[in-house]
Amino acid sequence: IRKMEKYILDGDMKRVEFDFDFYGLQNYSRMVTKANGIIPWMAGNPIAPKNLKPRPAITEMKWEVHPEGIYDMLKYFDKYEKIDKIIVTENGAAFPDVVDGDFVHDKQRKKFYQDYLRQVLCAKREGVNVAGYFAWSLLDNFEWAEGYHPRFGLVHVDFETQKRTIKDSGLWFKEFLSKG
């Protein structure tokens, strides 16, 4: 960066410090760590959700379901005076879908959204300016690291026929949004 210093004008660093319309928050899970006893200054060692006590619910991605985490993050970033509004740009989970004719049952995903949105609404009621929320994702999609599986969508996609079927979680989400 020293080679660039001659191009930095007075006040430039202050201008780039905070200059955005909103803060975009993505939340899927949390990572619990334990201290690294050999090298104390090094980052902690992750603890797999299956080894936590009590054992939490986990997704197909082996991520812990921890709705309180989104509340904690919203409250944390709300403390920054220059952040005017927060938009949850991604939040969702992959669980097994049970395709039953024209229905797709995904009880765990429905509960995931109920629990996480409850936490978002709690933060909003406490004064956090949550300006938007985007579920990940509307449709089952291609995940760059995983391919066509696991499925995150509120709508099931048969990738061979392209048939779309609204999952139980999608029907719940529609009802939730229609209540305002």
Image: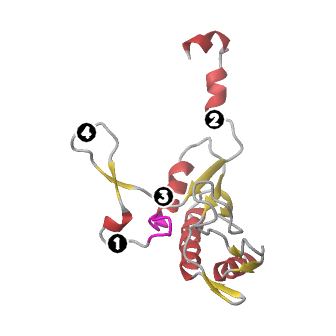
| Residue designated by label 1 | 55
Three-letter amino acid code at the position of disc 3: Asp
Residue 36 showing in the rendered view: yes
Three-letter amino acid code at the position of disc 4: Pro
Q: Which x, y percent locates residue 104?
A: 65, 84
Quadrant in which the C terminus is drawn: bottom right
Colour convention: secondary structure
Quadrant in which the N terminus is drawn: top right
From the viewer's perspective, tell me whether residue 50 is left or right of residue 164: left
| Residue designated by label 3 | 72
Q: Which x, y percent locates residue 124?
A: 60, 63
Q: Which x, y percent locates residue 112?
A: 54, 73
Q: Earlier in the sequence, mark 3 or mark 1?
A: 1
Q: Closer to us: mark 3 or mark 1?
A: 1
| Res. 139 image quadrant | bottom right
Q: Classify 137 as above or below 174.
A: above
Q: Are marks 3 and 2 in contact (CB under 8 Å)?
A: no
Residue found farthest to the front: 160
**Crowd band around label 4 with a 10 angstrom C-alpha radius: few (<14), some (14–19), many (20+):** few
* Tag of residue 64: none
Q: Are marks 4 and 3 in contact (CB under 8 Å)?
A: no
- Distance between the Cα atoms at labels 1 and 2? 39 Å
| Residue designated by label 2 | 18
Residue stretch in magenta: 58-68
Secondary structure beneath label 3: helix
Secondary structure beneath label 4: loop
Instruction: Please give the name of the residue rendered at 21% of the width and 44% of the height, measured from the top-left corner.
Output: 37
Secondary structure beneath label 2: loop
- Distance between the Cα atoms at labels 1 and 4? 27 Å
Q: Earlier in the sequence, mark 4 or mark 3?
A: 4
